[in-house]
Image: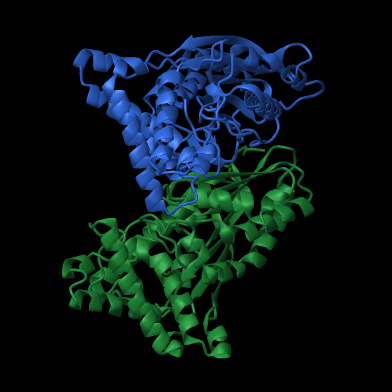
Chain colours: A blue, B green
Amino acid sequence: MTRDLTGEMEGHGAYDQHSLAQHSAGSFGMPLLERAIGEVAPLVRDDRAVTVADLGAAGGRNELDPMGAAIAGLRSGGVSAPVLVVHTDIPTNDFTTLFETIENSPNTYLHQPEVYAFAAGRSFYERIFPASSVTFGWSAVAVHWLSRVPQPIPDHVYCAFATGAARDAFVRESAADWDAFLGARAAELRDEGQVVVVGGAATDDGASGAEALMDALNDALHDAVATGRITEREYAGMTVPTWNRTLAEFTAPFAAGGPAAEAGLELLEHSIALLPDQYLPQFRASGDASAFADSVSAFVRAFTEPSLIETLDRPADERAAIADSVYGDVRTRLAAAPDSFETTWRVALLRIRRTVRRGPGPT
Amino acid sequence: MTRDLTGEMEGHGAYDQHSLAQHSAGSFGMPLLERAIGEVAPLVRDDRAVTVADLGAAGGRNELDPMGAAIAGLRSGGVSAPVLVVHTDIPTNDFTTLFETIENSPNTYLHQPEVYAFAAGRSFYERIFPASSVTFGWSAVAVHWLSRVPQPIPDHVYCAFATGAARDAFVRESAADWDAFLGARAAELRDEGQVVVVGGAATDDGASGAEALMDALNDALHDAVATGRITEREYAGMTVPTWNRTLAEFTAPFAAGGPAAEAGLELLEHSIALLPDQYLPQFRASGDASAFADSVSAFVRAFTEPSLIETLDRPADERAAIADSVYGDVRTRLAAAPDSFETTWRVALLRIRRTVRRGPGPT
């Protein structure tokens, strides 16, 4: 649930190669995508190109299936117009991997006729598209990445462990970012256009389901301070810039008088789901703790190294050595007791519609 | 004149930092751009977004001024619709640098209202946009990069030195690629839409104006073979995949019955210009041969290292050491006799219009 919004992602497709959980989480949103596409297809009444936005695309591997399904759904809904698929992410995203994935993957949606792929290198907390120009939007496992770290979390790197003033700051930043996301989409969606959000979430108690895993990472970083590999000051600056919202936090702006409702958005569906651990079943079948630890430590590394290690003011080779050491330590902890690190990410599923604008809208 | 179309560009903005000649060459096209924009602005009669294509964007630094001028020209021509600027290049291009340049440069066109930036990671020898969807296109110092090396050039790495069968193969590949470029644009341009091409060119005798410089590079590679730093076989596989077309080669497809004419394109303007050496004047003023050699060797390295050195089947550190050695040798040759390496690139300036399609076209 894991995308870096404030620094570069781990390069050369590492994120894509270790994003099984993100892929599975996205699949929870497919029924909502199909319902949304079924409802927006009739909006398209001429041959002008239809824009589909993929908001927070990362390396693209997890985006091929939903985009392919969206296009197929538009076609079966009678849309013959060209479809423009626009993958967005922050400017530092690895767009080379994204384009190579789209062009070269066996399951690319580009095999469908009259489909054109583009990218936008801009945060989805800002406006990316012209007003009323997007027919359907999709954002999977991306909106938990905040636009910035509001303040460090004492003695931890992960939002679920924030308390007191730090927790309050994350709650405020998360609310402001979510309002910004929704405000931008309210402007960009055409009348009755829809966006489906699969959001990294927390249950009402604030738990994201990854506490044990993230504690292991935090313990490894503490040990790195103790052994002098990183300084206390470096550790104090380390925060994964995410916030897993509760369903109440996701839905609040849609209440009557709330900012999303005022901006012209209505929430058609909302629910929360638990994503079963993606790696433990194989361990339990094989008993191979080493393979489990390899996979899960690579998964954690792919989404946390950019914000924790790559931001250190040190030469690249020192950063690489620190990362090898820290995630090696995480790996050792995982291998010693796989069942202690069961991870059940929470996923919020939201289907959102733009209401009809007052006055003569775009046709 | 220098963009890599078959491998990754030298990363981290190196191309952008050493592309003074490309920037200056592009500036030759600005009057054509202004004339084209003046003619296409009246085509835009409603508030639907207008697409401007920047074909072969590389890192984006040289694209900000022409795109800014195109947008300003549309606005002063009465266009109030949103403008979508789509920067295209091959998938391996450094799109991160491109987006960071667009978002963060002081002279970015994004300061203008209702402008939205996108990228497409696809070769311009293929279709990138839906039919009839592009109002204006711009391609500066990019179409001399061929889609592939048709065959190696014996005893040289640079197209101007090809003879016999190798030369014939380059001429054929260049013609096929140029036809593919024009055919794709003929489909994509709206009726009466225009594209301006600033193309790396050769005078009728086949000279690109960079012969001395590219000979220095070839000599350095020969020496690298002689000293055993690279193998004879590695050298034999090295080719910069470019072809600098003569004006006759550029204009041939527009003749009556030619493929561009048949596809619906007409050539409004064509000329050829010489780009004065960008580095010698400063050397002649300062006498600083070392600074001259630094700049010019970095320029050559930025556009040739990807196709010559980065394609070697060797570990990255060996490739880096080879490149340091070869371009160091080039630098030494340049420093010894700056005036011997005067480089006057040729640039073709073309303004092309899509004719009105038969039958009811898109409005």
What x and y, as percent, mark residue B96? Answer: 50, 48
Q: Nearer the viewer, residue A288 or B180?
A: A288
Q: Is residue A60 visible?
A: no
Which residue is at the far front?
A226
Q: Is residue B264 above or below residue A273?
A: below
Q: Is residue B94 above or below residue B338?
A: above
What x and y, as percent, mark residue A2? Answer: 47, 29
| Residue at image coords 23%, 73% | B154
- Quarter occupied by residue A350: top right
In this rendering, position of residue B144 left or right of residue A87: left
Which residue is at the far right?
A359
Q: Is residue A195 visible?
A: yes
Q: Nearer the viewer, residue B217 or A336?
A: A336
What x and y, as percent, mark residue A107? Answer: 35, 29
Q: How many marks?
A: 0
- Quarter occupied by residue B26: bottom right
What x and y, as percent, mark residue A76? Answer: 48, 17
Q: Is residue B283 above or below residue B133?
A: below
In this rendering, position of residue A103 left or right of residue B261: left
Quarter the C terminus of chain A occupies: top right
In this rendering, position of residue A262 left or right of residue B135: right
Q: Is residue B134 above or below residue B210?
A: above
Q: Nearer the viewer, residue B291 or B355?
A: B291
